[in-house]
Image: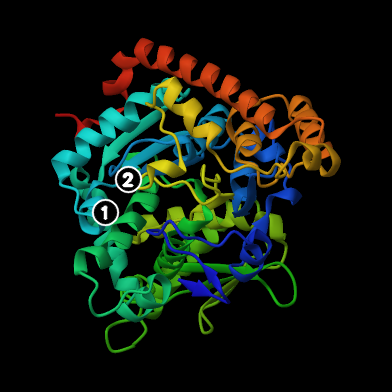
Amino acid sequence: MMNGGLTINPWSSQQSTDYGRIIEQFGLQSTSDLEIPSPSKLHRRGIVFAHRDFDVVLQSQKCGEDFGVLTGLMPSGKMHMGHSMVIDQVKWLQSLGGDVTIAVADLESSATRGISLSEGRRTAINEYISYYAALGLDPESTEIYFQSRRSEVQKLGFLLGKKTNIGEMESIYGFNGSTNMAHVQAPLVQAGDILHPQLDEFGGIRPIVVPVGVDQDPHLRLTRGLASKSNWFNIAPDKSRGLSINLSINEESAQCFGVDAHGRINREKQRKTYLKIEQTLSTLGFSDISSNPKQGTVSLPGAKKTDTHMVRKVLLKLERELGGLGLMAPASTYHRFAVGLTGDKMSSSKPKTTFFLGDDLDVTAKKIKKSFSGGQATLEEHRRLGGNPDIDVAYQYLMYFFEEDDKALHELYQGYKSGKILAGEMKQTCIDKASEWLKELKEKKDETAHLVEAFLSKDSKD
């Protein structure tokens, strides 16, 4: 998808990296304004740079309320370092108390990449899930499922499909007349992936955060829009003061709100529904509740903007009791792309751009030695002018993956920029750190091999 010259496509390896413009044009919020508890290195270093509604998740965590984490994997290649960055974020969110759900997008990989379901299953287990415990995920609060085996996801995606149309899908994804229908359906299944952890049988209504690269934002915007369109109660700041709740009369809610197929209003049914709304809101401590059935609104003049999430949550529960879906729009965080070895984005389909978690140490070392450098053309120029760590792949990998100590990283940055540290020395530092990291990972992978089955959901086990 193009937007003002920015390229954002969830299925492409060519993406825009002008993150300031991305925040502005796609309506994201900077994470710099958030109070993040025990931030990981990815947060401290600005690698996780933007969000939607992550403040809601943090507030829930602060109050000791439940929240969930949703991520997924495309079983069409080997797991590389860029994928491990997502797991680092998931692990951090899990440490804050989030329950983790991981979707294996086997239906999507079949639709968009021609991967059979059986091949996708083998790849998911052998190339991805086998590393998760070694990377630090806790199987006790992690559930991994396959799209093809979870009918609730497919059903929810089908129901949500009524809230969009071909025109919107073309606008978001750039679909055209030659796009096969399985590909068109894939984003709806993914919307089902993202939203279904809120169903009662999968944990109930709670904030769900999805950590992604910005290339996945089209999926998040579609899903947030679908959740919003399905809601029976829309909450917004009142023009005068407090909060205003607007009732959405649609095909699913009309009967409950006392409106029949011909638009006639059953006053008694309408009165009972408004009474339920008022009773629900009163449980939050509000007493100044003003209902206006004629305008289809309920006002809370005493409410504050910070009460929005609390009000939304109880109304979503009421919506579900009344027969609606009751889905909260997902939160999301966005990380910068991990630069590939050639200076471009990492891609499983382009082995020269990355190294994989299963690569031998000597292969990794050779790839780093050949990686794109920010050094000068000659030793004399490098000593005099210094290197550019912002484009140097070895330094970037230390920042993203291998150097946990911020002070040590800063010293590397300054040393390289001043010319004190040479390009070859930076690469050797990266090789040493990467080798240590990968060696430890392989050892942990062997130690935790027995935990693979523990990650799989009941509906995904053979």
Q: Closer to the camera, 147 or 81?
A: 81
Secondary structure of residue under mark 1: helix
Instruction: Give how far across and how far down residue 282 sits, in percent.
Output: 59, 55
Indicate whether 65 appears above or below 357.
below
**Is residue 148 at least partly visible in the picture?**
yes
Asked whether disc 2 touches disc 1, contact meaning CB atoms under 8 Å apart, the reply is yes
Q: Quadrant of the N terminus?
A: bottom left
Write down the residue under mark 1: 108
Write down the residue under mark 2: 74
Q: Quadrant of the C terminus?
A: top left
Q: Closer to the camera, 237 or 35?
A: 35
Instruction: Give how far across and how far down residue 339 sits, in percent.
Output: 55, 46
**Amino acid type indicated by mark 2:** Met
The answer to whether 414 appears left or right of 18 in the picture is right
Instruction: Give how far across and how far down residue 92 sits, in percent.
Output: 56, 31
The Cα–Cα distance between marks 2 and 1, rounded to whole angstroms, is 8 Å
**Amino acid type indicated by mark 1:** Glu
